Image (tube, rainbow, N blue to C red):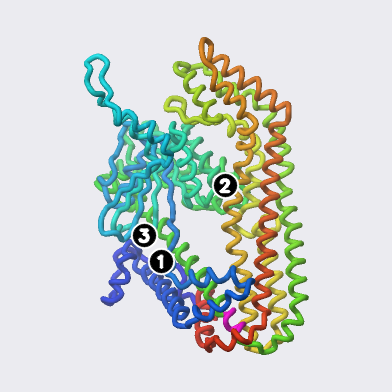
Amino acid sequence: MASNALESPGAHWGDAVEIPAKKKRRTFKYKSFLVEEKELLMQYEKLESRTRKILKDSTMDKFFSNLRCMPEASYILDRFFKLMEKTSLDPIYIGLFGSTGAGKTSLLNTILEKRFFLPVSGSTVCTSCVVEIHTSRAESYEAKIHLFSDEAHISKILDPYIRCQRNKDKGEPSQDGDAHLWPLIKKVEVTIPRPDVIPEGVVFVDIPGTGDFNDKRDQMWKESINACSVIWIISGMVRAQGEKVQETLLAESIKAYQAGKCNDITLVVTKSDDVKFEEYMRERKVKNKSLASEHDAILENNESVKLKRRSKIMRQLKKQLPSDSEILDKADLVYTVSAQEYWEEEKLTKEETEIPKLRDSIRQLYLKERKKLLMNYVIEVYVIFALAQNLSSTEDLKSWKLQQDSLETFVMKGINELEKEVEKCFAQIEQPLKDGIEMAKKSHQNIIDGILNRTSGKRGYHRTLKALCQKNGMYVSRTFARLDINNDLARPIYEKINPVFGTIFRDQAGTRATLKGCLETFRSTVQEKFKEGGKKKSMADSSRLDFLVQETNVILNSLDGEILKSKAEVYQSLPLSIQNDLQPYYEAAGNVRGINACQTMQNIIKKNIEKEVSSGMFEEAAKRMKDEFQKLKDKITRTLNKNFSNMLNLALSQREELAEKLPDLQNQYKEIKDIYNKLHGKA
């Protein structure tokens, strides 16, 4: 009968449960969780602690040191010694992505239950530096300011401080040094101690809406977006009716969803209490239902905004993502929140502000990641004990050895078949790439005209255009926001390939149309072959079978991280290829001086983009993307060949001298297996 002791619970704040004093000390770090969630996390902690103690008490460290004489064991030795250390959950990054004045800071303060923690900008434009808020068990607040390491860059910016500058009119020292210091800053990192309502290990990233005119900090902006597991697009209620800036933020978020670690996008509409009752009633379309108060008007308006915004965002997501993406079935795609009402409770209750709902989503994400961490840890320890038991027994090894050639042949054939399936999977991108190229050829002139030809706001644009050329076609201007020639030229291709690209790299296994599906088919085929070979073996050989099956899981799970890194390189290859082709012309335009410089720069860019398009610039970009797919396929094949070869050599090696040095670990092996089964809901 399956165990459900570790299933995610439901509970309410304030549930009365008597917790022993010893448990109270252990649960302090889980104080932001509901009562039953704390119990669940303590079970995770207890299982992990027990697993680590079993490993430590086994004295296998001395034995494994002897494995250094086996070349094929090198890839597993580092894993063994790392397992002796305490695991820690990788930080969970939640990006707050919105323009100035949208209420990001007020929302973040309220989520943290610290009303006046971070300064609120109001209508003032704040510096667009990335700010990270870390939660931890530290005793005090800490702040770190990360500076760029480029010494020449720092020296140049510090120059106004080092040199005594004089006011030209009065001969007095200049007081504008602060204006020069800010570009030194890469990011600001703040750590808050012992959070009451947010799990430790969660990192909030305040991401400016359009990057930064400082190209180094703009790079930090891009890296921050791609590092986030979750992106909250923040929009003020009065701005939630379809501003272009929101389309830009959503487009950037979808890029992160495609190329980065992001697996969830949420729209958070702030200032939901900003409803004028009389005005709302005059404009209200629902006439057959009366409203008694401003409270009712706010709640009705919130539901209306949710429906409208969900519909609009969903159209864009469906256009860009595979039709069966999990995010398209997400119930809470839009939240309407009020930081002010959370504190004042004049019009809404705390629950109605939806701040608690956002916190709940964070806790659920933490619980999911914590369980995943534990399961991966137990699997790896399980593999170590299975290997040890395997090496300690030579019983019936001869019959296994007879199968070694057969198993190796089967696995290598399976990898070859996998390579063909991956190639078919990646080939899905070819037709969308062709369609995208045709679309890009038709639209590139309009795209460039939209960037280079200003019908309004021309003043000072020549300086922006020069900076755009000097920075290789990408510049974030205070006046004209984000300009990116390379990405804009690639946009029609992305519009064609995005749904297919999302299908290929979809997290769900699905069919062989997905890379995950190809790998899962390979996993099950290989594991079935191992199980078939072990069906008639003795109980002693069960450890050998366990090692083969579980090490297969470890190998393929570790491959996920490599695929994630490569995915970003594949996705970003299009604009990088275009930038590379246009590089000489950016340099030429950036060096233009004198009268009519702006017109001359525009002519250089337009003329040479036309020339490169005619010479196959878009075709070359598509080729580069296909080359990146090929590199990924080769990396997968190479990694699997190497690791499975090592695995089979380890599993089927006969080392009697090592077996004699290994203590009897049968009981510990059985206990680890029981923990593994409990986590997987097995009897």
Residues at marks 1 and 2, CA–CA distance in whole angstroms: 34 Å
**Residue flagged by tag 2: what amino acid is it?**
Ala
Was residue 242 drawn as part of the magenta stretch in this picture?
no
Mark nearer the N terminus (3 vs 1): 1
Residue nearest the observer in this picture, 377 or 390: 390
Residue in the picture at 60% in, 76% down: 69
Mark nearer the N terminus (1 vs 2): 1
Residues at marks 3 and 1, CA–CA distance in whole angstroms: 17 Å
Q: Which region is colored magenta?
A: 386-391
Circle 3: is it few (<14), some (14-19), or many (20+) Cα within 10 Å? Answer: many
The residue tagged 1 is 10
**Residue flagged by tag 1: what amino acid is it?**
Gly
Q: Could you tell me which quadrant the N terminus lies in?
A: bottom right
Mark 3 vs 1: CB contact within 8 A:
no
Secondary structure state at the residue bearing disc 3: loop
Residue in the picture at 54% in, 48% down: 260
